[in-house]
C-alpha cells in the first residue's frame, strides 16, 4: 500500500536570531494550486515583513512536485533550507512559509540559512504528523435504470460518503486507495450500462 507522511492541520512556529524574527507556518495541501492563495494571505497579514520565503512538496516518487522560493534573500539561504527540512522529515503534501522581520543586524549567509532551517524545524515540531494512503479517482456515469445495481455496488464494497460524491444527477466520482484502483475499475466495467469517464 502506498503511504506518505504529511501534517494533519496548519501549525505555527517562531525563531529569533539577533533581533530578526522568523515566523513559520505549515499547511497541509493537496496540490500546488493551493500555494499562491496561502502565501498571498500571509503577505497580506504580515505586509510589513521584509521576506516571505517558502517551500512546498506534493505527491511521491514519479508524481512528486516541489519548489523553493527565497523572496529576495541571498540564493539558497531560505527556500532551500525550508525544503531541506521537508525532505529530511520525509513529508509531502505540505507548504512551509517563513516570514522574516529584519532586526537591523545582518546575519550573514550561514547564520541566515541556519535561522530559516530552524524556523522550519520549529513549525514541523509543532505540527501533528500523520500517515495517509495515496488515493485514486474513478469517475463514471450510468443510466437511472441501473440505479439499484449502482447502490448494490456501493453497499457491497462498504463505500461511505467519504468515498464517493454525485457530481451530477447520474455521475459519481469515486475516491479509493490507489492500490485498489484496478480492482474497482474491473468491478464497475462488469456492470452493464456503466460508462467510465
Image: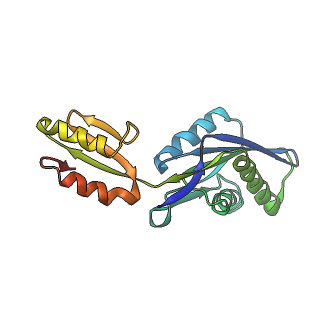
- Residue sitting at x 62%, y 38%: 42
- Residue sitting at x 62%, y 40%: 10
Q: Residue furthest front?
A: 156
Where is residue 20 shown, x and y percent of the image? 82, 45
Q: How is the image coloured?
A: rainbow
Q: Residue furthest bottom?
A: 62
Q: Is residue 196 above or below residue 179?
A: above
Q: Quadrant of residue 44?
A: top right
How many numbered discs sit on the rendered protein?
A: 0
**Left-right relation of 45 to 155:** right
Where is residue 13 shown, x and y percent of the image? 74, 43
Where is residue 155 shown, x and y percent of the image? 30, 40
Where is residue 151 shown, x and y percent of the image? 24, 38
Q: Quadrant of residue 101?
A: top right
- Residue sitting at x 21%, y 32%: 169
Q: Considering depth in this image, is 36 or 173 the residue closer to the camera?
A: 173
Taking the image as drawn, is residue 87 in sight?
yes
Q: Considering depth in this image, is 21 or 88 the residue closer to the camera?
A: 88
**Left-right relation of 149 to 22:** left
Q: Considering depth in this image, is 158 or 146 the residue closer to the camera?
A: 158
Taking the image as drawn, is residue 102 in sight?
no
Q: Is residue 117 above or below residue 34?
A: below
Q: Considering depth in this image, is 19 or 62 the residue closer to the camera?
A: 62
**Left-right relation of 85 to 171:** right
Amino acid at each position: 500500500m502506498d503511504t506518505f507522511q504529511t501534517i494533519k492541520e496548519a501549525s505555527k512556529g517562531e525563531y529569533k536570531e539577533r533581533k530578526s524574527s522568523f515566523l513559520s507556518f505549515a499547511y497541509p495541501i493537496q496540490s500546488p494550486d493551493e500555494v499562491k492563495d496561502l502565501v498571498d494571505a500571509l503577505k497580506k497579514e504580515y505586509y510589513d515583513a521584509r521576506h516571505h520565503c517558502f517551500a512546498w512538496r506534493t505527491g511521491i516518487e514519479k508524481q512528486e512536485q516541489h519548489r523553493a522560493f527565497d523572496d529576495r534573500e541571498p540564493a539558497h539561504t531560505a527556500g532551500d533550507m525550508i525544503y531541506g527540512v521537508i525532505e529530511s522529515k520525509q513529508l509531502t503534501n505540505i507548504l512551509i512559509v517563513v516570514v522574516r522581520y529584519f532586526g537591523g543586524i545582518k546575519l550573514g549567509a550561514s547564520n541566515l540559512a541556519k535561522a530559516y532551517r530552524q524556523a522550519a524545524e520549529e513549525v514541523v515540531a509543532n505540527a501533528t504528523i500523520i500517515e495517509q494512503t495515496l488515493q485514486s479517482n474513478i469517475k463514471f456515469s450510468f443510466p437511472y435504470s441501473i440505479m439499484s445495481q449502482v447502490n448494490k455496488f456501493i453497499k457491497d464494497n462498504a463505500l461511505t460518503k467519504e468515498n464517493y460524491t454525485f457530481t451530477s444527477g447520474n455521475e459519481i466520482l469515486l475516491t479509493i486507495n490507489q492500490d485498489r484502483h484496478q480492482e474497482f475499475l474491473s468491478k464497475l466495467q462488469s456492470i452493464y450500462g456503466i460508462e467510465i469517464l
